Image (spheres, rainbow, N blue to C red):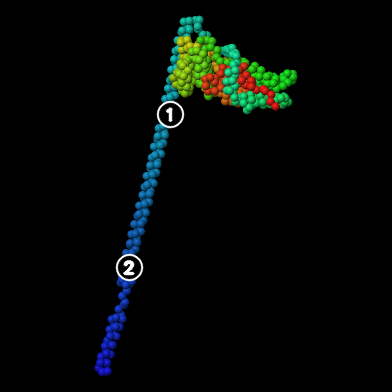
Amino acid sequence: MDPTILAVLVVAGILAAVIYFKVIAKKPAELPEGDKPAKELPEGDKPKKNELKEKLENKRDEQQKTEEDRKKAAEAEKQAKEKAAKEQAEAEERTARKAAEEAQRAEAEARKRAEEEAQKKAEEEARKKAKEEQAAREAKPSEAPPASVELVRRPPPVVAPKAASERDVAKVRRGLARSTGEEGFFGRLSALVRRKELPPELLDELQEVLLTSDVGVKTTEKLLERIRTGLERKELTDTARVWDALRQEAKKILGVGGGGIVVGAKPTVVMMVGVNGAGKTTTIAKIGTQLSQRKKSVVMAAGDTFRAAAVQQLEAWGTRVGCPVVKGKDGADPAGVVFDAISRAKSEGLDVVLCDTAGRLQTKTPLMDELKKIARSAAKALDGAPHETLLVIDATNGQNALAQARLFNEALPLTGIVLTKLDGTAKGGVILQICDELGVPVRYIGLGERSEDLHEFDADEYVEAVFGEHGKEVA
């Protein structure tokens, strides 16, 4: 090769190598767009970047805190509104309740004043009518009553006994089904003496049955004494004779007087008394129905002025039966109502006056004194009135019934007893105790809800009903 050409090639190679190392070898390889390294800031610009970042973070924190404060404020405001609304509602409720209580007090006071005024007015009217009656009696000396009217204890009117028909006995027996059943008083009594032989412990067994059936200690001893004497004298040698002895002794105890009402004077005044719930108003309605069916003219006195429902109930019965009802205003003096009813019966020529009275506990002396006042008012309206004072007793009360009868009989001259709801008790012995210990006759017995279920009491009929189907021997 030509040395010149070789020299040129060597120089060209050296130049190429120089160019490569100076230009190409020193240029860094280009990275992809996403992988290019961040351009470093000059040393003086780095603190500015950190400060900006810190400000952004602080601003973000402040915004977040402001949002939380706004939420808390909104929640607090909501709770405050709910609390205020609740307090307002409670305040309105208290105000309304207070206003209602004040209205009730005002109404009660107004009612009380009205009742007092009505009572005063009724008393004034009663006094006025009493003066008029007094003036009329003075004009006719022969009809003038005694100057001072006192309650006189007269013997009960005598009622002629009636023949006990088979139909009446059957009706009474059905009404006394609970007492005559196996678990009832008369059923248990008959079970003791239906055996073929008299057991040695007969008297003890009889005593247990009698005492647990509301017969009472005194009456039980009287019955047992009769049986004990008969056994000692060898007169009661079998169960049939023991049963007959009990039957006769019961008839003797119950036969202290007849049943029903004797319509003698015109008008005959009948006063009904008793505790609450005994059935006075219903009994008056039933007696009024029976008297009307016997062609007797009846007027009812709504003397239970303390219970508005009693007046309405009596009016409803009066409309149904066809009997006029004399009533006063709410809270009127019951003595004045009774006086008015008797005066009306006298002027219209009616046969019977049935006087209802408010129920009362027999232990409340002021209430019992009020009954005496009513009785005195009746005596002022008509000499000899009331001709009958009947105590209505709930037979299911047992021994308490006797306590009622005893205390009422001490306060008033009772002429008879009405024993209601006798069909509702299995004991039934209280009727023997009342007749024996008080000597007051039973006038009526109630054996159901209908008017025909109120029976005029008849001792023979009653004894036949409860003793007639028992006493047969069993093995």
Say which residue label 1 marks.
105
Indicate the secondary structure of the residue bearing disc 2.
Answer: helix
Residue positioned 47% across, 20% down in the render: 317
Question: Real-space Cα distance between discs 2 and 1?
Answer: 85 Å
* Quadrant of the rendered image containing residue 247: top right
Tally of marks: 2
Residue 172: x %, y % from top left: 58, 20
Say which residue label 2 marks.
47
* Residue 395 visible in the shown view: no
Q: Residues within 10 Å of mark 2 (few under 14, many from 20)?
A: few
The N terminus: image quadrant: bottom left
Q: Which mark is residue 471?
A: none
The C terminus: image quadrant: top right
Three-letter amino acid code at disc 2? Pro
Three-letter amino acid code at disc 1? Arg
Residue positioned 40% across, 41% down in the render: 87
Residue 345: x %, y % from top left: 47, 12
